[in-house]
Image (cartoon, grey):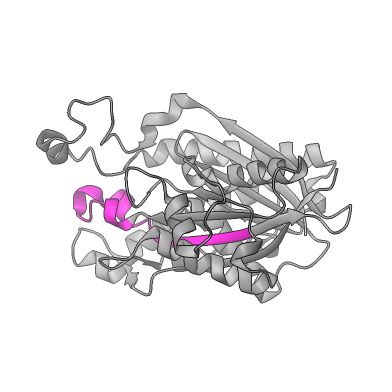
Amino acid sequence: MHRTQILATGFAVPERVVSNDELAKVMDTSDEWIRTRTGIQERHWVREGETGAELARQATMKALEMSGLQVSDLDAIIYATSTPDHFIPGGGVFLQRLLKAPGIPALDIRTQCSGFIYGLSIAQAWIQTGEYRRVLLVGAEVQSTGMDVSTRGRNTAVIFADGAGAVILASADHEGQGILATDLRSDGDGIEFLWVDGPGSRYHPRVSVEHLEQGRYFLQMDGKEVFRHAVTRMPESVRTVLDKAGLTIGDVDLLIPHQANLRISEAVQKALGLRDDQVYNNIMRYGNTTAATIPIALDECVRSGRLKRGQVLVMTAFGSGFLWGSVAVRW
């Protein structure tokens, strides 16, 4: 059974750049406060009318260009997002329509920050079993429109941002190449530490003035609890996936962690004993784009030559759910 390889990558972010100083004009914060706590210097937010599906299309077209393939060569779409453009249906079919790829299946997955990791595992299974030959996996988010951009919501509003990253997967050309192992985990006891309470079908009606006034439609986060769990679970998962692949930390050429917070990435790096040149971070330029963070960083590494053929890449994520996991790849 052949392994699954990533053929090509691409990403897209909105043109609008929002600096820390711009946020300081509308909430009680400062550039120093944000940089110290998150490492973020700026992020990209959509303007009115821009959608996650359109960002996903742009990222997809860049990946197709890199691969030399056409839209007609794609057999299936996996669309990872926690911020669909509409409540129903999911974003996958909106992307499918924009791509003009009628007939192929489009699966949405809601595993938030770990969406790209979970999506890689699904794509791998489809390809290895022969269900599909070429799978498009996209992580796309528009978080800015769900933020409470005020002092009340500053602990999330300064962190989250918009963007999309895409990869095209297929059967590996060489036996030793491609996805070596995956590790997927969850713990529902952490749900309320990072979640959006409403709208939800448990409420009658789903949307109410009372809930709006209470801020239940904004992302809520207990930063200390998320940090505490992330810096433990991500290193554990990395070690687990390496063990499954028959590798050790010493074999890792590059780690791309989910870009949740630079302090989390630094703690994970320290726990694993990795050097600065072995870990890639870009949160300072893009913020936390949830399911899009890893594929955006991956595309930057591929296009800059940071990731070379034959090297061992590990990607790891932790987020809302709690859901987390890792993937080991020989590039």
Q: Is 18 in front, or is 92?
A: 92
Q: Which residues are magenta?
A: 144-167
Please give left or right for residue 126 compared with residue 13 in the image: right
Q: Is 219 in front, or is 85?
A: 85
Please give left or right for residue 269 compared with residue 284 in the image: right
Asked where in the image residue 41 lies, by quadrant, the reply is bottom left
Residue drawn at the location 28% of the way across and 68% of the way down: 47
* Most distant residue in the right direction: 175
Residue drawn at the location 64% of the way across and 41% of the way down: 122
Q: Is 175 in front, or is 248?
A: 175
Please give left or right for residue 84 compared with residue 95 in the image: left
Asked where in the image residue 169 lies, by quadrant, the reply is bottom right
- Residue 162 in the magenta stretch? The answer is yes
* Most distant residue in the front direction: 103
Residue drawn at the location 32% of the way across and 38% of the way down: 196
Q: Could you tell me residue 238's position as x and y percent?
A: 69, 42
Q: Is residue 284 visible?
A: no
Q: Could you tell me residue 84's position as x and y percent?
A: 38, 49
- Residue 185 in the magenta stretch? The answer is no
Indicate the quadrant containing the C terminus: top left, top right, bottom left or bottom right. bottom right
Q: Is residue 68 visible?
A: yes
Q: Could you tell me residue 237's position as x and y percent?
A: 66, 38
Q: Could you tell me residue 28's position as x and y percent?
A: 20, 58
Q: Is residue 2 above or below residue 28?
A: above
